[in-house]
Image (spheres, rainbow, N blue to C red):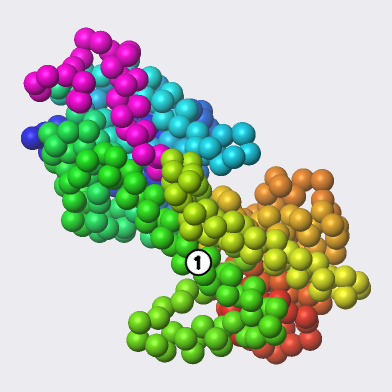
Amino acid sequence: MLKKTTLNASVIGLGYIGLPTSAVMARAGCKVQGVDVSEAVVETINRGEVHIEEVDLDGLVQAVVNDGLLTASLDVEPSDVFVIAVPTPFSNDGKHTPDISYILQAAEKVAGVLKKGDCVILESTSPVGTTEKMRDVFAEKRPDLAMPGLCEGTPDVSIAYCPERVLPGRILEELIHNDRSIGGITPRCARKALAFYKRFVKGECVVTDARSAEMTKLVENAFRDVNIAFANELSMIADKQALDVWEVIRLANRHPRVNVLQPGPGVGGHCIAVDPWFIVHGAPDEANIIRQARETNDGKMHHVLARAEAIADANPDAKIACLGLAFKANIDDFRESPALDIAVSLAKDYGNRVKVVEPYTSELPREFDGTNAELVDIDEALEDCGILLLLVDHDVFKAIPPEERGDAVVYDTRGVWS
C-alpha cells in the first residue's frame, strides 16, 4: 500500500471536476501536480486563484497552493498516481457519437512518464470499454511495462475507472462523502485504486470491474434523464389539455409509491444531457427508452421556445425578460443549458426586446454575440419588462413577491411561482 505521507499525484484536466479533486487530494496530504492545456488556467491556479465558480473552492485552492501541496503545469511529470479528468464531448458528426480523443491524448502524455508501480485512474465519464482503450495506448507507447489484462503474472502498472458523483455547488462535500464505484481492469488494479481513494473519500468505495463502473455512471444519469422526461412529457400534455401540471404532480405524489419529478425547460449540464447518448451509441437497437427520453427532453426545450414566441407575438410592445441561463439553480455553469438556448433563440428573433437576468455572470455568453439582447439586473427587468420568462429557479427569482410581477405576462417553466 502507498505510504500516505509520500504520495505524489497528478491530475490531468483542471476543470469542474479536476480542480476540486486536486484540491481535496492536496488537503489530504498528497503532493499534487495539476495539468491543463490552458496556460491561463495554469497561471491562475499557481497564483492560488480559481477559474471556476464552486462553493468554498477558492479558499481551499489558495490554502493548498500556499502550502506547496498543489502546483499546476502544462506538462505531465512523473508521479505515483495519475487521475485523468478531461472532457468527453460529442464528435462533430451530428450523431451524438462520443469523442474520447481527449482521454487518449492525455494517456499518451502520461505514457511518457509511467514507471513500474504507478496507478492510472480514469474519472472522465466514458463509453463502456474506454478504460481498456486507454490501457492499450499505454501498451503501445510503453512495451517495456507489463499492462493489466495483457500479461501473465503481475502487471507493472495498475489501471482503473472511478467516476465522480457530484452536484455543482456541493462538489467539495460530495467528493468526500459520496460513495464511489472503483472499477479495475483486474481486481489487483481495483485494490490499488481503492487504497488511493480511501485517503480522502469517507463514503463507501465499492470495488468492481472497469466496464461495469463505466456503465454504472452512464446508468445513473440515464435513470435521472428518463424520469425527468416523464415529467417534461406530462407538462406538455398538461399544456395541451389546459391543466396545471404542478397541481397534477402535487396530487399524484401523495400516492405512497409515486414520486414524479418536477418538469423544466429541458435538461442541461455536462452529464444528464450527454451521458445517455453514450449508452445509445453502444447499443443503438436496444436503448429505445433511453433514446426516447433524450428526444423528449430536447423536445421540451422547443416546446417552451414555441410558447414563449407565441406570448411575445401576442404582446408585441412588451419587453421580454429571460430569467436565468444556467443549466440548474444557483450555479454559473451554462453547459448544455436549455435556458441558454431558449434565451439566445429569442434574442435572435426579437432583438433588443430581450433582457437577460443571470445573477451568476457579469457578461452575456458568447452565444449572444450579434444579438441586441442586454444583460440587466432583476430590478430593472421587473420594472421594464411586460413578459417574464422564468427559465432557472435561482433563489433570487424565488424571492420575487407576487405584487412585483402582477402586471406582467408570466411564463414559469419551473413552477416556482405556481
Quarter in which the N terminus is drawn: top left
Residue furthest to the top in view is 144
- Residue at 44% over, 43% down: 283
The residue type indicated by label 1 comes to Ile
The overriding secondary structure of the stretch rendered in magenta is loop
The answer to whether residue 31 is above or below residue 220 is above
Q: Is residue 143 magenta?
A: yes
Instruction: Say whether residue 340 is left or right of residue 247.
Output: right
Measured from the top left, where is residue 35 in percent x and y? 39, 30
Q: Quadrant of residue 405?
A: bottom right
- Residue at 46% over, 77% down: 260
Q: Which residue is mark 1?
A: 228
Question: Can residue 62 be seen?
Answer: no
The answer to whether residue 136 is above or below residue 301 is above
**Residue 169 vs residue 51, the one in the foreground:** 169
Instruction: Say whether residue 13 is left or right of residue 382.
Output: left
The answer to whether residue 284 is above or below residue 244 is above
Quarter in which the C terminus is drawn: bottom right
Measured from the top left, where is residue 34 in percent x and y? 36, 33
Measured from the top left, where is residue 43 in percent x and y? 47, 32
**Residue 353 vs residue 282, the one in the foreground:** 282
- Residue at 52% over, 53% down: 291
Question: Can residue 262 be seen?
Answer: yes
**Residue 344 vs residue 252, the one in the foreground:** 252
Residue furthest to the front in view is 285
Q: Which residues are magenta?
A: 125-154
Instruction: Say whether residue 316 is left or right of residue 118.
Output: right
- Residue at 56% over, 34% down: 91
